[in-house]
Image (cartoon, rainbow, N blue to C red):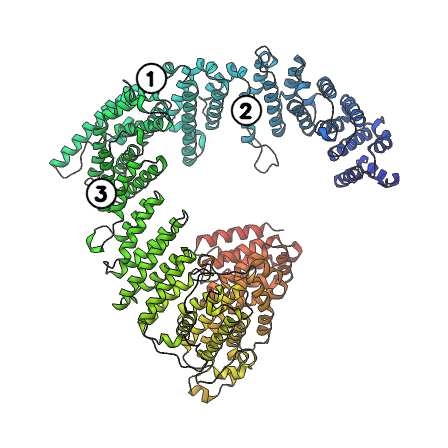
Amino acid sequence: MAKVAVGQWVPHVEAFVDVSRPPAQHSASVDALAALVNKDKLSLFDLVSKMEMYLTTTDHIVRSRGILLLGEILCRISFKQLDVNAISTLSDFFISRLSDWQALRGALVGCLALLQRKQTVGSIIIADVKRLLEIFLQNVQVQSLAATDRKLCFQILNYILDHYPEAVKTMGDELLYGICEAIDEEKDPECLKLSFHLVEAVMKLFPDPSGLAAQYANEVFEILSKYYPIYFTHGVGDDLDATRDDLSKALMHTICSTPYFEPFAIPLLLDKLSSSLPLAKLDSLKYLDNCIRCYGANRMGRHATNIWLKLKEVIFSLSIDQILSTSGSSKDMEKNKNQIVSEALTCLKTAVTHMGPSDEDRLINLILLDEDIVSSIHSVASEETSGLTSLQNPIQLHALGSVISILAESSAYFCTRVLQAHFARLVDSLEISAGRETQHLNNCSGPSSGAINYGSLYLSVQMLSSCREVALACKEDFSPIKSAKESWWLILDEKMDSLIHLLQSLLTIESQSVQSAVRQEYVSCAVKGLIILATFPEPCSPLSANAYEDVLLTLTSVIMSKYENVHLWRLSLKALASIGSSILEFHASQKENIYNKVVVDKISFLDEPCRTSIPLNLRLEACFEVGTSGSNCMLRVAKSLEEAVVNGRIKCTEYVVNLLECYCGRVLPWLFTFGGVNELALNFAMRLWNEIRDLAISDRIGSQGLLSSLMMGMKLVVGICTEEQQSLIVQKAYDTISSMLSLPVKSMTQHLLTVDEPIPLYSVRDTSLMCMFSSVIVGLRPQTPVPDMLMMINLFTVFLLKGQIPAAHALASIFNKNLYNSEFSHENKLDKVIDTILERCFSTISLQSNMKISLSYAVRSDDANFSESLSGSIESKNDIISGLAWLGKGLLMRGDEKVKDVSLFLLKCLCSDQSLAGISSHQEEHGINNSSYASLATSAADAFHVMMSDSEVCLNKKFHARIKPLYKQRFFSILMPIFLSKIKESTVMTTKLVLYRAFGHIISNAPVPAVITEARQILLVMVDSLAKLSQDVKYKDLVYSLLLVLSGMLMDEKGKECIVENIHIIVSVLTQLVSYPHMMVVRETALQCLVAMSSLPHSKIYRMRPQILQAAIKALDDKKRTVRQEAVRCRQTWQSFA
């Protein structure tokens, strides 16, 4: 590699050394020199040799700049291979410079760069690292330096401790003295974060009881304690790498880094728990939790009593006034209180979990026999007043329940002790209060003054939950626990019958008593208890099979008969779904059989609506929710729905429609995610065709809403099936319609309908059968064999020519997927079929008489002659144009060139009224008027929306359509020049409006990157179309779509360039749309666009500021809140724009 001449690189050195140069030039000089070294165009030896005068001069400014330059270059060549001599020389130099306080920064940068080099490219040796550390501790006074230099110091010390521990372990007291001196009184957040990590690393390096960490723990912790709790005074906008949370976590990890901090940390943390500052309480709880985990049970055992007393004080005695006085608002108060109690409970759980095993009896006695706990539980059990006033504070009741739960679920031994102490008394109290309530209800009709003891109910359910957690944690054989003389399971079993009866009675009493929030608490707690009992793992379930069935019957009866009580009904439904899910989780076969019999079969059995009291929507919701318990349950629900739909016993059309919507819209999609639904779908489709035959015979198939539901259901079912299964469905459908259609089906199998062949007549029943058959075709896979394709195409063509859109869906699917059939094994033959059908459609739309028209006519005829031929039934022609659009969509999606014929024909329709100015009186007499042309042109414009938009009813991935990549982009690129030319040439306003409408559909459905690519050509036309279309309410959806495209351009750099060039026109249109009366989201989006425009070049947009502010101020009075909010944001953005 040729070396660069000295004269080419020395100026970079001089530029860096010159302090008068700007920082950007300094940085560029370093980069240039480092690049030369990395590319071997400049050797490091030559660089250092030529820089000698800068590195050794007595001018401390020049010397410091020269050393810093060498250090910065060394940072930038960290991946360049350096030999041992080079590394050694550089190490000696930078280590020696640590004593040069006037050039210290360069020395620190160079030392850090040497430490961070990998061994594979040449790194500093251990002896030099040790020497570096010794000289650093002797010469560098860290706290006398600026923040940037202190940060470098801490980075060096951290890197040595983390990556070169062997260089540190042999050092003595001077290491800890130096670190303590370096970190003491540090206040910069980023340096503090590094200093905390430094202490953590050094304390972990000496774990021995006689090591430095143990000897100096007191001195080090004294420094750390000054920073607790972290008080962060820096503002949100300060550019810092350290947040308060970062610092707090770093300090916490440091305090927990060694158990030798325990004698000093725990008393401090417990003391801070009495602080009036919520933040200090939260930090103390988090730190205490981590200390318990890190210090170990032996060390923490001596603090057990103090920890419990402090946690109890926080959990139970947290004063509302105490929190409010430091929170500033009631919302902050509630948030802080919840956080503090939650952290205290988490800390208690950690203490019980980590400290319990070492001394079980001591810990359980400390909490369970605590006077306050015992007194509180006895108070709850003996209470006779309404339960939600227990302990005069429901929050304290919940806190008591949480403490009991944490204690009981920690181990089987703890659970047994808790239940032995309190469970029987609580259940007895609950039983007594329930007996009083039942007696009162039997004697009078009014509500009871002494309600069921809610406190006993709540605590009993909490203990049940703890028992379940212990059972889940018990992975070995459960029989020893059942057979033990004293165990929580035996205590639970003894009271099980009473408890189940009590919980069930609460659901019964609830329906008879006054509805209130208090009552809802009772019911929620009772339902929770039943869920817990029913979801124990099967080997250790306290419920017998009969009791389990009884619980399910209770909940199911609520679903079937108590739907008026919405709260109870929804709770019970969620309970049943939860119980069902637990069966799948624990593989409980016996429970599964009971659940299917009692719950699934009973809820999903659907009969005539008059035979059940529960509303159908609730019944179907219950069916689906219960089915979500597992795939087996959902299959049973699906089969029940299938039976209800296809067995013919339900005569109510509306009822069947709802069943179909649930089955196809919710059940089948859910099952599809689990697989194995194909056979179910096949059976349903085959049975549905039998039902369709019966419905057709009885003329019920065309009932309001039934046909559309049957069609969508058939599409979804067919789409799920495999090719073999679809083939069976197609054959079944073909046989059915062949035998039932009144049309001459046999003649349709011989040849395609010609252009001048009359369209056969058909009945309403024929239309319904055709619609169902089209649904089958829409859902087919491309390789599914189809019988008698010629007949099908003729059939659908007949209905298409009468404006039946489902027929167009079927034909579009056939042409898009090129469905397999021996008759059309060659694509050329299918192409001829397509030509014939398109020609017939063009002819039907264009001529009232039997005059022939070819594809070439659609392409080459002049506008005047074409306009003269447009006559006949406009409604029918509009439908045919829509159908033609679907055919074009099918061809477009697979990339067929014949889509051009459809597009050109639609363009002719769009421009058909160009010659209306010269329309003759003879034509007017024959009904050819402006409104007819306008209607036809509008349909042609909307046809482009059909072709470009995504559809849920046909031609999508769900129905296996063939979709060629980037088909929308190509179609957009082909049509844009044509549309721009037509719009420019158009002189009739009605024609221009429909061209704008079609143009808008294409633009809004094309991918935004494709639109941005052509932004320079289309932007002005798009803005003009926004202005014109916004004057008519019927275009409001299209206006919104175009506005979204414009907002997309504002997010793209190329789009912004085009917008800047036409800023005046665009701002004018947007400010008008801010007052658009017909759609709120248009006004909102227009304001958002104006806000986004503030990022455009200042010189281009500043003059638009008054106009935009005027529009924003006007929008401040908008009746919609979201618009007013955007107006405020817009005004603030542009008012601050200067």
* Residue at 46% across, 19% down: 270
Q: Residue 979 appears at what percent x and percent y? A: 57, 71
Quarter of the image holding residue 1097?
Answer: bottom right
Extreme-bottom residue of the structure: 922
Judged by depth in the image, the label closer to the viewer, 3 or 1, is 3
- What residue is shown with label 1? 370
* Residue at 54% across, 53% down: 1130
Extreme-top residue of the structure: 210
Q: Residue 963 appears at what percent x and percent y? A: 52, 60
Q: Residues within 10 Å of mark 1 (few under 14, many from 20)?
A: some
Q: Residues within 10 Å of mark 3 (few under 14, many from 20)?
A: some
- What residue is shown with label 2? 253
The reply to whether callout 3 and callout 2 are in contact (CB within 8 Å) is no
State which tag comes first along the sequence, 2 or 1: 2
Residue 1134 against residue 692 in the figure, above or below: above
Kind of residue at disc 3: Ser
Residue situated in front as seen by the camera: 736 or 912: 736
Q: CA distance from mark 2 to mark 1?
A: 33 Å
The reply to whether callout 2 and callout 1 are in contact (CB within 8 Å) is no
Q: CA distance from mark 3 to mark 2?
A: 55 Å
Q: Secondary structure at mark 3?
A: helix
Q: Quadrant of the N terminus?
A: top right
Horizontal side of 504 relative to 861 (left or right) equals left
Q: Secondary structure at mark 2?
A: helix
The reply to whether callout 3 and callout 1 are in contact (CB within 8 Å) is no
State which tag comes first along the sequence, 3 or 1: 1
Quarter of the image holding residue 315?
Answer: top left
Q: Residue 576 appears at what percent x and percent y? A: 29, 40
Judged by depth in the image, the label closer to the viewer, 2 or 1, is 2
Kind of residue at disc 1: Asp
State which tag comes first along the sequence, 3 or 2: 2
Q: Residue 117 appears at what percent x and percent y? A: 71, 29
